[in-house]
Amino acid sequence: MLQKLIELEGHSRNYVSLDDLNDRALAKSDPAMFFQIHQPPILIDEVQYAPELFTYIKIYVDKDQRAGDFWMTGSQLFKLMDGVQESLAGRVALLHLSPLSQQEICSRQDGAFTLNINVLADRQKTIPPTSAPEIFERIFLGGMPALVSKKYQERNIFYSGYINTYLERDVKDLSGSIDSLKFLNFITAVAARASQMVNYKGIADDCDIDQTTAKSWLRILETLGIIFYLHPYSNNVLKRTVKTPKLYFYDTGLVCYLTKWSSAETAMNGATNGALLENYTVSEIQKSYQNVGKEPYLYYYRDKEAKEIDLLMEGDGQLFPIEIKKTATPELIKKI
């Protein structure tokens, strides 16, 4: 896929993956020699394995002042990697490549989600309504390219391998030795709490770990781009709002796998169908902004009397409340 991206660019660009242990060792031990062998313009994949390169990239960029010479990809969120902010601050443009959004799966380019009535009306003319079973088929499938493209037909085998190889490998890179069984129990407990306020004690108790470890492992999942948070909206006037963030997964297919739903139909009729629908909706909106290089201003509202708004969008000095419900007869939101 990365090689295809280079072909689409239309001019010569070197490619190197730091999955190759020889290239990784050279990048870590002698970055100057690495860049003599692999000269810009270059795409460096799995760059998180050699943060030693960042200082040399900074020197090169400051000297040549040529944008786009370095493309870097990796399985960790760039802004959360150690040393990146100091080395490349003001010199990088960040794009978060999450699992495929519904726009990408349907080959549409609608841009970032908007509540503009005219835009929504125009979209309604070209996009047919989707039934609840169809929505839950999308939720159950998720957005992993290998499953969406049908390269892999057995989703259980795919997700099992995804957790046991890719996730476990990167988790160990970030945290050192880790109990694989406890980590599987941990990520399962987290998936069971998708679309809920984070409860460190509850997660820790479910996995027989302490709260400090639970917080550390959640940080790892965030760094790997598996989960993200929705923080509560607050201002100087709202003194009674809660402070705890809500937790979401970028891929609802992974949530369904971990929580052991066997089909889209059972997920739709199960006890957590509301949470799955909310996770899907929030993650789609989040991805629609990230895919056009924008930072979404998304929050939720909940006060100490448990009055809640699922999603708040902020823009142009306005707040737009969004209620997410699985129902055929939605009601207007009452004033809170």
Image (cartoon, grey):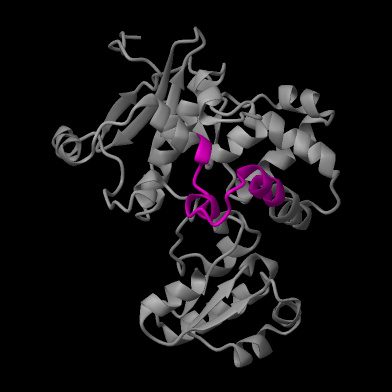
Q: Is residue 55 left or right of residue 201?
A: left
Q: Is residue 41 above or below residue 261?
A: below
Q: Which residues are magenta?
A: 140-162
| Viewer-side residue, 248 vs 145 | 145
Q: Residue furthest front?
A: 153
Q: Is residue 104 left or right of residue 197?
A: left
Q: Is residue 228 left or right of residue 115?
A: right
| Viewer-side residue, 152 vs 107 | 152
- Seen at 62% across and 69% down, the residue is 47
- Seen at 55% across and 66% down, the residue is 73
Question: In this orientation, does residue 216 appear?
Answer: yes
Q: Can you give x and y, in whole percent of width and height, for residue 318 in the image? A: 26, 31
Q: Can you give x and y, in whole percent of width and height, for residue 51 in the image? A: 66, 69
Place residue 206 in its image quadrant.
top right
Q: Can you give x and y, in whole percent of width and height, for residue 201 in the image? A: 74, 23
- Quarter of the image containing the C terminus? top left
Count of marks overlaid on the render: 0
| Viewer-side residue, 271 vs 179 | 271
Q: Can you give x and y, in whole percent of width and height, for residue 186 in the image? A: 75, 34
Q: Is residue 276 above or below residue 53?
A: above
Q: Is residue 215 magenta?
A: no
Place residue 26 in its image quadrant.
bottom right
- Seen at 31% across and 31% down, the residue is 130
